[in-house]
Amino acid sequence: MIYLDSAATTKPCAETVAAVAEAMRDSFGNASSLHRMGIRSEKIITAAKKTLLSKLGEGDIIFTSGATESSNTAINGAADIYRRTGNRIVTTAIEHPSVANVMTRLEEKGFEVVRLAPKDHPDFVQALADAVDEHTLLLSCMAVNNETGYAVDVKRLYRLVKKKNPKTIVHIDAVQGFLKVPLEGDLISISGHKIHASKGIGALYIKKGIRITPLLLGGGQQKNLRSGTEPVEIIAGLDAAVRAYHGTAEHFSALKQRLLERLSSLSGITVNSGEDCLPNIVNFSVEGVRSEIMLHSLEEREIYVSSGSACSRGKTSGVLAAFGIPDKLADSAVRVSMCADTTAEDIDALVAGINAGIERFRR
Ligand code: PLP
C-alpha cells in the first residue's frame, strides 16, 4: 500500500499508538478528580500543553476535538469579545470550510467579511494587511493551504497586521503548517490527525492576554474555555506525535523534485502547486482524465491520493479557482500529500500509475 494522502489524514505513529494504549491502561482517571488517578491524568495534560507551547510560544492551550472545533471556538469566541473594537473581519478565499463556513454565519449575523484571493494579489500577505482598517476586529488566515500546499508567511502577516491595527486579533488555521513552518498568531488552530496523532484531538493556542468566550458550556474544565472531561488518552497521543514528528523540508523537497521531474516526461500534466507551496503537498492536473477516475485507477494499484480536498468531496472546490486554476484543470486535479515515511520508490510507483491511468482513460 502506498499512502499519499497525508493532508487528508496521517497514519498514527508508533509512539502515539503506544502512548494512547498506555494511558488507556494506566491513566484513565478523570483529570478533575482529586485523588491520585485524577492527578496522574492532569499531569499528562500539563505535559502535553508544555510540548505544544514549546512549539507555539507563550500562552495557553485548550484541547478540542479537532481543528474544526478549534477554529469555531477561536473565531466565534473572538468575535464575541472583540466586536466592540469593530465589525470588519478580513479572511481569505482559500480557507478550509471549518473557517469559511463560520465566516458565512458571522456575515449573516451582520459582520462585514472581506475575502481575498491569492490570484488577485502578487504580495498576498501585504494585501491582507492592507485590508485591515481601524474597524477590523479579526483577521483569519491559514498558514498552509490543504489543497495546493500554498504557504503564507504568517510571521510577516502578524507583524504587518499589528502595525496596521494592534487591536486586530489574528487567527491562524495551522492544520497543515504546524511543525512545518514558523507560526505566529493570537489564536492558532491545530489538528492531531494531520501530524500522526489520532482523530478526535486538536488544540487551540491562545496567546497571553487574548480572551475568547467558550463554544461549549458545561463543567468548566480547561479554565471554562472548553467544558467536557478531557480525553487524556488521545491528549497523551498528541503529545507523543508532536515529540516524534520527523518530517523535514529537505526530504519533502527531494521527493517533490523527483515527482515533478518524472511527471514532466508525461504529456498533458499541469502542476498547480508552484514555488510558493510547501513541498509535501503537490497538486497537478492530468489533461483528459477526471480526478475521480484517476483516483480510483490508482486505488486499483493500492496507491491512495486525493482529488482536490478530501473535505470537499462531491463539491467543486472554489479554492482552486481562488488560486486562478481554471475549472477544466480543477476537474482533473490530483493531490499528492506526503509524510516523513514517503520514499522515492513510492513516487516512482505513483508516476507509473498515473501513466497507466492516462493510457487507459485519456479522452
Ligand atoms: N483546516 C485545514 C487546513 C484542514 O486541512 C482541515 C482538515 O482537512 C481542517 C482544518 C479540519 O481539521 P479537523 O479534521 O481536525 O477538524
Image (spheres, rainbow, N blue to C red):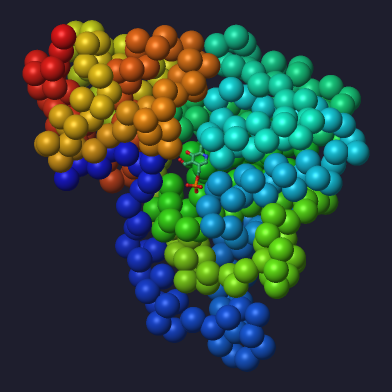
Residue 241: give x, y in percent of width and height: 44, 58
Residue beneath the point at 39% across and 53% down? 196
Q: Is residue 209 above or below residue 122?
A: below
Residue beneath the point at 58% across and 58% down? 64
Horizontal side of residue 46 vs 176, given as left or right = right
The part of the image, by quadrant, that contains residue 203 is bottom right
The part of the image, by quadrant, that contains residue 360 is top left
Residue 357: give x, y in percent of width and height: 13, 22
Q: Quadrant location of the C terminus? A: top left
Horizontal side of residue 98 vs 185, given as left or right = left
Total number of numbered labels?
0
Front residue of 165/304: it is 304
Farthest-out residue, front: 108
Q: Quadrant location of the N terminus? A: top left
Farthest-out residue, bottom: 35
Residue 109: give x, y in percent of width and height: 76, 35
